[in-house]
């Protein structure tokens, strides 16, 4: 990196390591799956969020760096900053997503995925599409070294081609050894350089074109080839 502004936006602490970021990523995904398996029809969003916090504590996280988010049904269209609906109940045929931001070994995890209860085929397709689109965009990053701005332009094109609407109010963000917020890096979708491995979260949120639900998927952009020789 030669640009001082870019240096600042991709800065991190002296304890930072890619191996620790990958460990935080793996532990966060373990937690997402445990939380999702525990969310059942009849539960409210508030109950699911409280359950998520307990499960994270039981897994031994250091702390959280962003609040646990669990959205049901129409709530899956909301962004991170929009107010939750703690009384919203998960139906027998419904869709929900889990978004967590725990810290493990001083490094920030951030993982989110969408799940479906029941047999609504369009809900299942929406959840699968968010995952597929994320992996498509991540592969584009690895292959073509695209800037963050170009990655989200590509994501919008691909989402439309797949028959979904991409929410461009959700454009990814920085992570690193806690706390990343001191670097004020802004959104990945506004980052005019190719994002470095292990420092950025790619967020994908899509909406059904006509029905009131959507899907969310996020993960760390990390090239595992860079992990060789790294130590926790």
Image (spheres, grey):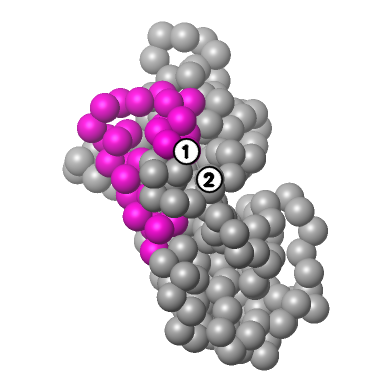
Q: Would you place residue 107 above or below residue 59 in this image?
A: above
Foreground of the two, 216 or 222: 216
Report if residue 210 is visible in the image.
Answer: yes
Q: Nearest the camera: 80 or 34? A: 80
Residue 144 forms part of the magenta stretch: yes
The spot of residue 152 in percent (x, y) is 47, 34
Q: How many marks?
A: 2
Picture coordinates of residue 131, whole percent (x, y): 39, 57
From the top left corner, tell me how far across and down residue 54 is, in percent.
63, 78
Q: Position of residue 210 (x, y in %)?
A: 59, 59
Left or right, residue 12 beside residue 48 = left
Q: Residue 116 bears which disc, if any?
A: none
The residue positioned 63% from the left and 85% from the top of the image is 91
Question: Which quadrant of the figure has residue 125?
Answer: bottom left
- Residue under label 2, please give it: 166
Instruction: Give 182 or 144, whichever is nearer the viewer.
Output: 144
Residue in the image at 48% along x and 51% along y? 164
What's the distance in space between the residues labelled 2 and 1, CA to CA? 6 Å
Disc 2 on helix, strand or loop? Answer: strand
Contact between labelled residues 1 and 2, with CB atoms less than 8 Å apart: yes
> Within the magenta stretch, is there residue 154?
yes
Q: Is residue 122 above or below residue 130?
A: below
Magenta-highlighted residues: 128-157
The overriding secondary structure of the stretch rendered in magenta is helix
Q: Which residue is mark 1?
A: 156
Which badge, 2 or 1, comes first in the chain's sequence? 1
């Amino acid at each position: 990196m030669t640009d001082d502004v870019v240096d600042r936006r991709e800065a991190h602490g002296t304890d930072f390591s890619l191996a620790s970021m990958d460990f935080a990523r793996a532990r966060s995904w373990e937690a997402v799956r445990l939380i999702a398996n525990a969310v059942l029809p009849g539960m409210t969003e508030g109950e699911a969020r409280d359950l998520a916090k307990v499960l994270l504590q039981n897994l031994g996280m250091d702390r959280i760096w962003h609040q646990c988010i669990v959205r049901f049904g129409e709530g899956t269209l909301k962004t991170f900053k929009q107010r939750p609906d703690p009384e919203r109940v998960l139906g027998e045929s419904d869709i929900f997503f889990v978004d967590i931001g725990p810290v493990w070994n001083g490094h920030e995890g951030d993982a989110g995925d969408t799940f479906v209860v029941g047999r609504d085929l369009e809900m299942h397709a929406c959840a699968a599409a968010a995952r597929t689109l994320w992996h498509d965009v991540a592969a584009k990053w690895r292959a073509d070294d695209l800037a963050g701005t170009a990655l989200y332009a590509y994501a919008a094109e691909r989402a439309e081609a797949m028959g979904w609407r991409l929410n461009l109010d959700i454009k990814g963000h920085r992570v690193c050894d806690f706390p990343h917020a001191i670097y004020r890096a802004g959104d990945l979708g506004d980052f005019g350089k190719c994002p470095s491995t292990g420092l950025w979260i790619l967020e994908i949120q899509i909406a059904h074109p006509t029905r009131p639900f959507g899907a969310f998927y996020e993960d760390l952009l990390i090239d595992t080839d860079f992990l060789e020789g790294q130590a926790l």
